[in-house]
Image (cartoon, rainbow, N blue to C red):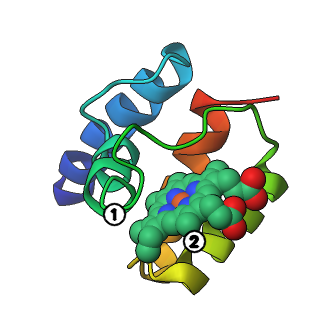
């Protein structure tokens, strides 16, 4: 029974994501952009569409410049950017 309590909200979240390809401004990736990217990109980051691999490359480059992201945050951010600004 305890397992159900974990699985049900998880399914709800997955369902929400699956049905809503449009980006929710409250999702973690969006907050990460504000917190970690706006420090240098006050007017917002480049919104040119990129593939997942290209966003990964761009974010890796930004980490090299001083953006602070752990590997998990990076994965969330790349996923967010690739969905928000796809090619
Ligand atoms: C320490 C400052 C700094 C931070 C933090 C930073 N950037 Fe940048 N970014 C730059 C500079 C400087 C450039 C332009 C020079 C270049 O492209 O090498 C740039 C360029 C870019 C470009 C264009 C690069 C290209 O190859 O076309 C993208 C996209 C980008 N940043 C996204 C991000 C994202 C997303 C984040 C948050 C994870 C971020 N940046 C955080 C300094 C920063």
Question: Which numbered circle lies on residue 18?
Answer: none
Q: Quadrant of ligand 1?
A: bottom right
Q: Nearer the viewer, residue 77 or 37?
A: 37
Dot 2 lies on which element? helix
Residue to which mark 1 is pinned? 36
Looking at the image, is 34 positioned above or below residue 19? Answer: below
Label 1 beta carbon within 8 A of ligand 1: yes
The C terminus, quarter of image: top right
User: SS at mark 1?
Assistant: helix
Q: Earlier in the sequence, mark 2 or mark 1?
A: 1
Residue at horizontal 82 percent and vertical 57 percent from the top: 53
Residue 20: x and y in percent read 48, 16
The residue positioned 67% from the left and 74% from the top of the image is 61
Q: Give the quarter of the image for residue 65.
A: bottom right
Q: Residue 81, image x and y in percent?
A: 58, 42
Mark 2 within 8 Å of ligand 1, using the beta carbon? yes
Q: Is residue 73 visible?
A: no
Quick one: 60 or 45, which is closer to the camera? 45
Toward which corner of the image does residue 47 lie, by quadrant? top right
Please name whichever residue, 77 or 33, is drawn nearer the observer in this view of the structure: 33
Q: Residues within 10 Å of mark 2 (few under 14, many from 20)?
A: some
Q: Which residue is mark 2?
A: 62
> Which percent across, then down, holds residue 39?
30, 61
Please say whether residue 50 is visible from this viewpoint: yes
């Amino acid at each position: 029974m305890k397992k159900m309590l974990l699985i049900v909200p998880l399914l709800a979240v997955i369902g929400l994501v699956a049905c809503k390809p449009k980006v929710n401004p409250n999702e973690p990736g969006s907050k990460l952009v504000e917190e970690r990217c706006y420090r240098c990109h006050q007017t917002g980051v480049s919104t040119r569409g990129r593939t997942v691999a290209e966003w990964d490359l761009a974010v890796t480059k930004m980490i090299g410049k001083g953006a602070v992201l752990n590997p998990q945050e990076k994965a969330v951010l790349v996923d967010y950017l690739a969905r928000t600004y796809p090619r």
